[in-house]
């Protein structure tokens, strides 16, 4: 479809539009404002909706199943052309997109780390100083596995709801001593003053794509793909391509904890990846780097004309390849694949298989370390929309 007017944005990643302060709508406004600045002659409309996954708030995310629970209705709206753009938290997007969909832009990453928000009774504490048996709220198996390994005296339990709901459960109740949340979501909500502790990579590595916003559109909508071009951030894009290539190669669809830490310098990309058993008792970590070198100016490929937005979904896990950046994206993708292969050769495949078997056993537990398999038969990726 060729867009002749400003594209319509689907204004909600996970349907939480009951009031304008909700995180997903804030993220959509971030993208809308960036588009408006880049294209002041256009007016971008925001359309909101609520997805089925966000209506199920009394079941742990690890028990619900695939991320598609949160994205399927959004994809349908895009396919049926009710909207032209969907804004996602990138960590919630599977590494394989539906046919005909692409990530038209990856916006500049917010702080990707996880943070601790303490109960008012424990504002001066850290995870290391909380009393034995303190209950930490998180619905992320990735966070729970790493932190259980680091803090074996703490208890990790699922907590559902949007950020406002989870914060209210923490501050007004006595169940949780602290919550673990993504720094990006907390900061976008303007709650920096509530952060008690930032978790560095030696304590808790973050999810693939965490902190970045992905702008999804239809592959054949060349005008919208072109309009999204100014929103793309190079350093963020190469970082998340490496991370998503790692996840895709690991086939991290069995809800085993997989996490990353990425650093982009002027001329190098460093990627650390890790895999944990569901209970955190086993850990594999490794770091690899690749130079972010300019392509050889004598290369014959440079003599060929390059399209403004060449879609290359298979190599780059759905991210559109743009003029002048394909070389860097290829280097990042290869880094992620090579790191995943190293982890697999070191035993990650055994850990992933054990997690899959544990999931298939459908163990009844509210512990996020023991998520049962999805009943819909679809693969699940590790970070299941825990902001």
Image (cartoon, rainbow, N blue to C red):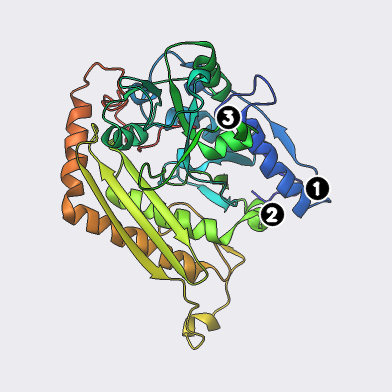
Q: Is 177 rendered above or below residue 334?
A: above
Q: Quadrant of residue 233?
A: bottom right
Q: In the drawing, does residue 61 fall left or right of residue 124?
A: left
The reply to whether residue 312 is in sight is no
Whichever of labels 3 and 2 marks the residue nearer the N terminus, that label is 3
Q: Which mark sits nearer the N-terminus, 2 or 1?
A: 1
Q: Which residue is mark 1?
A: 42
Camera-near label (3 vs 2) is 3
Position of 173 compared to 288: left or right?
right
Residue 351 in the image: x percent, y percent? 19, 41
Do the residues under discs 1 and 3 have CB atoms within 8 angstroms?
no
Q: Is residue 358 above or below residue 102?
A: above
Q: Give 220 or 182, whichever is nearer the viewer.
A: 182
- Residue that mark 2 sits on: 227
Instruction: Quote the CA–CA distance across marks 3 and 2.
Output: 37 Å
Q: Which is nearer the N-term, disc 1 or disc 3?
A: 1
Name the spot of residue 62 as percent of width and height, x first: 34, 25
Image spot of residue 149 (x, y percent): 26, 36
Alpha-carbon span between mark 1 and mark 3: 37 Å
Callout 2 secondary element: helix
Q: How many C-alpha atoms fall within 10 Å of the one at disc 3: few (<14), some, or many (≥20)?
A: some
Q: Position of residue 67 (x, y in %)?
A: 42, 32
Q: Residue furthest bottom?
A: 298
Which residue occupies 48% across, 68% down? 328
Question: Circle 1 sits in a helix, a strand or a loop, which is it?
Answer: loop
Is residue 221 shown to the viewer in this render?
A: yes
Q: Quadrant of residue 147?
A: top left
Foreground of the two, 78 or 151: 151
Helix, strand or loop under label 3: helix
Picture quadrant where residue 281 is located: top left
**Residue that mark 3 sits on:** 194
């Amino acid at each position: 479809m060729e867009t002749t007017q400003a594209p319509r944005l689907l204004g909600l990643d996970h349907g939480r539009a009951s009031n304008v302060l909700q995180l997903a709508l804030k993220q959509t406004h971030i993208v809308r404002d960036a588009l408006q600045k880049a294209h002041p002659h256009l007016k971008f409309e925001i359309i909101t909706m609520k997805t089925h996954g966000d209506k199920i708030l009394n079941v742990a995310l690890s028990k619900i199943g695939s991320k598609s629970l949160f994205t399927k209705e959004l994809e349908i709206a895009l396919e049926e052309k009710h909207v032209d753009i969907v804004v996602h938290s990138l960590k919630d997007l599977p590494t394989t997109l539906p046919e005909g969909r692409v990530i038209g832009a990856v916006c500049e990453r917010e702080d990707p780390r996880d943070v601790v928000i303490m109960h008012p009774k424990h504002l001066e504490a850290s995870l290391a100083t909380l009393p034995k048996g303190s209950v930490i709220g998180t619905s992320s198996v990735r966070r729970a596995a790493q932190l259980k390994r680091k803090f074996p005296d703490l208890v990790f339990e699922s907590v559902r709801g949007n950020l406002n709901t989870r914060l209210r459960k923490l501050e007004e109740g006595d169940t949780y001593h602290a919550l673990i949340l993504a720094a990006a979501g907390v900061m976008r909500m303007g709650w920096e003053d509530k952060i008690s502790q930032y978790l560095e990579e030696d304590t808790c590595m973050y999810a693939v794509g965490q902190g970045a916003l992905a702008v999804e559109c239809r592959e054949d909508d060349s005008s919208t793909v072109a309009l999204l071009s100014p929103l793309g951030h190079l350093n963020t894009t190469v970082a998340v391509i490496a991370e998503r290539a790692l996840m895709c190669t690991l086939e991290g669809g069995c809800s085993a904890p997989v996490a990353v830490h990425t650093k982009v310098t002027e001329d190098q990309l460093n990627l650390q990846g890790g895999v944990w058993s569901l209970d955190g008792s086993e850990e594999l970590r490794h770091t690899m780097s690749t130079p972010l070198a300019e392509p050889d100016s004598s290369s014959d490929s440079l003599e060929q004309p390059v399209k403004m937005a060449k879609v290359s979904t298979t190599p780059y896990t759905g991210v559109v390849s743009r003029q002048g950046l394909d070389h860097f994206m290829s280097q990042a993708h290869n880094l992620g694949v090579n790191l995943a292969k190293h982890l697999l050769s070191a035993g990650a495949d055994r850990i992933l298989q054990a997690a899959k078997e544990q999931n298939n056993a459908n163990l009844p537990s509210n512990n996020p370390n023991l998520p049962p398999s999805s009943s819909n038969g679809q693969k699940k990726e590790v970070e299941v929309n825990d902001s």
